[in-house]
Image (spheres, grey):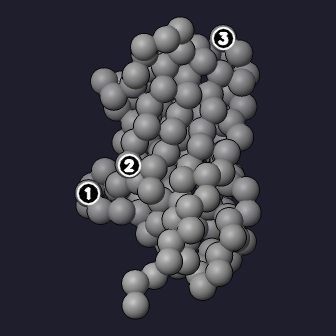
Amino acid sequence: MLPHWRPQIVEVPITVTTSAYTAEDVIGGTLTSGTLTQYAGGGYIAWVRLVDDDDEKAALRLYVYREAPSTIADAAAFAPTEADWLKTLGCIELAAADYDASGADACIVAAGIDRKTEREIIFDSLPAGKLFFRLVCDATPTYADANDLTLHICVLTM
């Protein structure tokens, strides 16, 4: 019998610094999803959506963790520890060229595909019932407002 996947779209709150980020800076520190309902445990990320209210269209990488990684503050250099790498599920690339800038703001929707393996980012039962994230700059964006980025994650769980 095929599994019955249940979609859940959760917002991942981000508060950004209004001074310039540099390449390899973490945006918003460690980010956390809301609690994900897991009936039988496990699932995968179907897609992510990042709305950029400041129209920066910055190239970013979204690292996904199954447990809380070590603390890295907003605007600090991305410096994962060995323990962080052991909790890493994958990394989604958000390329500058992939933003849709049809209106006054930019938006990017990316598949939940790991940038290296080109496979879905899957997870088993989550110890805290949540996913954790790090949003890392490839460029040097400067956001005008602390709420300029809105991130949604669509997960499919069993």
Quarter of the rendering containing residue 139:
top left
Q: Position of residue 47 (x, y in %)?
A: 45, 50
In this rendering, the answer to whether 43 lies above or below 75 is: below
- What's the CA distance linking mark 2 and mark 1? 10 Å
Instruction: Estimate how packed mark 2 is, as few (under 14), some (14 to 19) or many (20 or more) residues with alpha carbons within 10 Å.
Output: some
- In screen coordinates, is 131 left or right of 44? right
Disc 1 residue type (three-letter): Glu
Note whether residue 6 is visible. Answer: yes
Seen at 40% across and 84% down, the residue is 2
Instruction: Estimate how packed mark 3 is, as few (under 14), some (14 to 19) or many (20 or more) residues with alpha carbons within 10 Å.
Output: some
Q: Nearer the viewer, mark 2 or mark 1?
A: 2
- Residue 144 has which mark? 3
Q: Position of residue 88 (x, y in %)?
A: 48, 64
Instruction: Estimate how packed mark 1 is, as few (under 14), some (14 to 19) or many (20 or more) residues with alpha carbons within 10 Å.
Output: few
Tag 2 residue: 111
Disc 3 residue type (three-letter): Ala
Seen at 43% across and 15% down, the residue is 101
Q: Position of residue 49 (x, y in %)?
A: 51, 39
Q: Nearer the viewer, residue 45 or 70?
A: 45
Local SS, label 3: loop
- Residue 118 has which mark? 1
From the image, which quarter does the C terminus lie in? bottom right
First-in-chain label (1 vs 3): 1
Q: Nearer the viewer, residue 86 or 54?
A: 54
Whether the residues at callouts 3 and 2 have beta carbons within 8 Å, the answer is: no
Local SS, label 2: strand
Seen at 71% across and 40% down, the residue is 13
Q: Position of residue 144 (x, y in %)?
A: 66, 11
Seen at 63% across and 32% down, the residue is 150
